[in-house]
Amino acid sequence: MTGFWADGDLSPNLIEQARIERSRQGGYLDLTSSNPTAQGLLFPPALLREAADGYWAKRLYQPDPHGQPAARRAIQGYYATRSPVLRLDLNAIFITASTSEAYSLLFALLCAPGDNVLGPHVTYPLFEYLAAVHHIELRPYQLDETRGWAVDETSVRAAADARTRAVLLISPHNPTGMIIQQPLAVLNQLALPVICDEVFAPFTYRADQTPPLGALHPAVPVFHLNGISKLFALPDLKLGWIALSGGAAEQYGERLELLNDTFLGSNSLTQHMLPQLFEHGLAFVQSMRDRVAQNIDWALQELADHAEIEARPPDGGYYLFLRLRSWSHEEALVLYLIEHGVLTHPGFFYGDVPGVHLMVSALTEPTTWRAGITQLSGALRA
Ligand SMILES: Cc1ncc(COP(=O)(O)O)c(C=O)c1O
């Protein structure tokens, strides 16, 4: 067979098999959820109804390959409130169906089959599939755990070759939480376009803010990817965007317009709602930030003197990427924890890095979070 993932093994792995088995036998505490709607974090329904209200009576399909101007003005306004501020031209914003779709458009825009994009190692396991769709290679550069998972600039330089078309940065990074707070010299040196995924931007913990990368690098063409799936906990309403800075709009805008026009993936209703989501949704965003920060506070305190688990405060994001001191096998560890009634993700789901790691999601509903962390801690003390 040929085509997408034709040689891939799609059968459930041992962890998934054990999870299914355990759910038949009394269940488990799930510390892996990234789904806000399953964790009691529901954007206020009344605000959603109100934001959608005006749409129905005046429905008129007026597709715009950039996205509706009012929605783009709201996005432009959002970047004007970021710190440092990023000033964007309205024509430098493209609305898409999701951040994942935005990636796909950018890989098509920047790459030919056989080209490569540099991406962080470890990373959220989405990009390898998107790269496969476009027949490109995702070449890893390293993050340095000893420096809070900072980008290892030497490894970025070493990974680049004549077929490298872009550098992908994720800030706040999933799952380590690392936030890029200072310019990276290597980006100025490589002179490549940068794709910066900032879907976790509002979730800061140790860092004061998530600087938009274009504000740190005004002379580098940057494509900022973001959307409402994390920002407003609305993954089901399907809206993302690409915001171009540093000359990217001038260089790539016309072709990106044609690409986005080819799909027109973002639905008009959600675009119509967007200005009101920004206008009235910020108190809800704050409540999510508080939930995540309080969960992280609690876990760091609970695990502070643990002989086996090393938990460091992240810059941001909503995960903890825990390091285990004496276990040597991640799969065995996760299977052992499932037996003890708690579900975590092994580090290898995010790539092959030295050491043994577990991912837990601080988006989890607080009672489950506390019970799960207590159970995890107890099982690993035993
Ligand atoms: C770093 C990162 N980027 C992008 C996405 C996908 O976002 P969207 O729902 O907008 O496609 C995710 C999903 O979890 C993510 O973790």
Image (cartoon, rainbow, N blue to C red):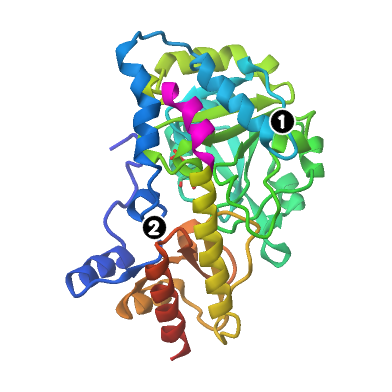
Mark earlier in primary sequence (2, 1): 2
Q: Residues within 10 Å of mark 1 (few under 14, many from 20)?
A: many
**What residue is shown with label 1?**
86
Q: In the visual, does 340 lie left or right of 160?
A: left
Residue 4, located in which quarter of the rendered image? top left
Choose between 134 and 6: the one closer to the eye: 134
Between circles 2 and 1, the one closer to the viewer is: 1
* Magenta-colored span: 271-282
Q: Residue 366: x percent and y percent? A: 42, 66
Tag shown at residue 33: 2
Q: Residue at x 39, y 40 (%)?
A: 235
Identify residue type, mark 2.
Ser
Q: What label does residue 209 carry, if any?
A: none
In this picture, is 100 found above or below 155? above
Residue at the farthest left position: 24
Q: CA distance from mark 2 to mark 1?
A: 32 Å
Give percent across and percent down for residue 191: 76, 31
Q: Quadrant of the N terminus?
A: top left
Across and down, in percent, residue 158 comes to 73, 47
What is the x, y in percent for residue 31?
Answer: 40, 66
Is disc 2 surrounded by few (<14), some (14 to 19) or many (20+) residues within 10 Å? some
**Quadrant housing the C terminus:** bottom left
Please report the residue visible at 57 percent of the width from the left and 69 percent of the height from the top: 297
Figure check: 291 above or below 182: below
